[in-house]
């Protein structure tokens, strides 16, 4: 890995250091958790790359052509919910499906996911059963919806509820 890559976004979890496209970006400051998520995703054949912080994550997502980001809620320097907001405001990243991941209580996690517009919320306590299906659902959606069209619409969950509420207030 070159000097500028390590300052851009640390990629110790990308074994070959290549610049190949990645389907999923995992952002978690806790190395053991990040590696666990990466192993889980890779075990089902997904291409995943990891980053230890939100710093440089958007550049990494753009550079690697990421379709889904799995973001830890509680990180130092920038909370995962703040990173979700940055991604949602970026025209070049608005198409990225977002899974908010946390060991926090389900109530806190679902509330945070709904407030920032994450597409899914997954608890680290049961991620072995729920993370892969959530990521696969977002990847399937990405395959159906051209990236140039901007943000996805969700036919279910908190995202749809948010959109309906906004439409109701605006219309």
Image (cartoon, grey):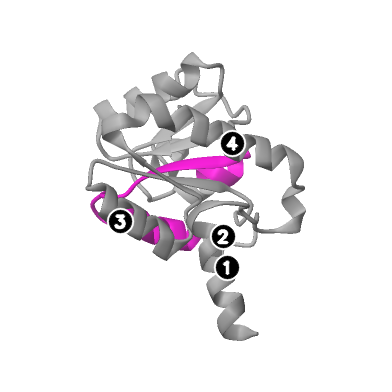
Q: Could you say where residue 22 lies in the image, as x and y percent from the top left? A: 58, 31
Q: Could you say where residue 73 lies in the image, as x and y percent from the top left? A: 31, 49
The residue to which callout 2 is attached is 160
Query: Quadrant where the C terminus lies?
Result: bottom right
Q: CA distance from mark 4 to mark 1?
A: 19 Å
Q: Which mark is residue 139?
A: none
- Where, by quadrant of the figure, is residue 19 drawn? top right
Work out whether mark 2 precedes mark 3 in sequence or the reverse, and give the earlier one: 3
The residue to which callout 3 is attached is 79
In the rendered image, the vertical position of residue 13 relative to residue 159, given as above or below? above
Question: Residue at the location (50% across, 47% down)?
Answer: 98
Q: CA distance from mark 3 to mark 1?
A: 23 Å
Work out whether mark 2 precedes mark 4 in sequence or the reverse, and give the earlier one: 4
From the image, state whether disc 3 or disc 1 is nearer to you.
Answer: 1
Q: CA distance from mark 2 to mark 4?
A: 15 Å
Q: CA distance from mark 2 to mark 3?
A: 23 Å
Work out whether mark 3 precedes mark 1 in sequence or the reverse, and give the earlier one: 3
The residue to which callout 1 is attached is 163
Q: CA distance from mark 4 to mark 3?
A: 25 Å
Work out whether mark 4 precedes mark 1 in sequence or the reverse, and give the earlier one: 4
Q: Which mark is residue 137?
A: 4
Whether residue 164 appears in this view of the structure is yes
Question: Residue at the location (34% across, 24% down)?
Answer: 35
Q: Could you say where residue 47 lies in the image, as x and y percent from the top left? A: 56, 24
Q: Residues within 10 Å of mark 3 (few under 14, many from 20)?
A: some
Q: Secondary structure at mark 3?
A: loop
- Check whether the beta carbons of the residues at disc 1 and disc 2 lie within 8 A of each other: yes
Whether residue 13 appears in this view of the structure is no
Q: Residues within 10 Å of mark 4 (few under 14, many from 20)?
A: some
């Amino acid at each position: 890995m070159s000097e500028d890559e390590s300052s851009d976004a640390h990629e110790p979890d990308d074994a070959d250091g290549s610049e190949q496209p990645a389907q999923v970006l995992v952002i978690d400051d806790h190395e053991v958790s990040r590696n666990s998520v990466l192993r889980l995703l890779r075990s089902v054949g997904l291409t995943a790359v990891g980053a230890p912080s939100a710093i440089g994550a958007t550049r990494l997502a753009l550079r690697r052509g990421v379709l889904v980001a799995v973001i830890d809620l509680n990180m130092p320097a920038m909370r995962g919910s703040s990173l979700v907001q940055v991604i949602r405001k970026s025209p070049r990243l608005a198409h990225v499906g977002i899974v908010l991941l946390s060991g926090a209580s389900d109530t806190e996690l679902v509330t945070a996911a709904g407030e920032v517009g994450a597409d899914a919320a997954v608890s680290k306590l049961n991620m072995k059963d729920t993370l892969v299906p959530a990521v696969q659902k977002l990847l399937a959606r990405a395959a159906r919806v051209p990236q140039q069209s901007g943000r996805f619409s969700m036919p279910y969950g908190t995202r749809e509820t948010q959109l309906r509420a906004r439409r109701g207030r605006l219309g």
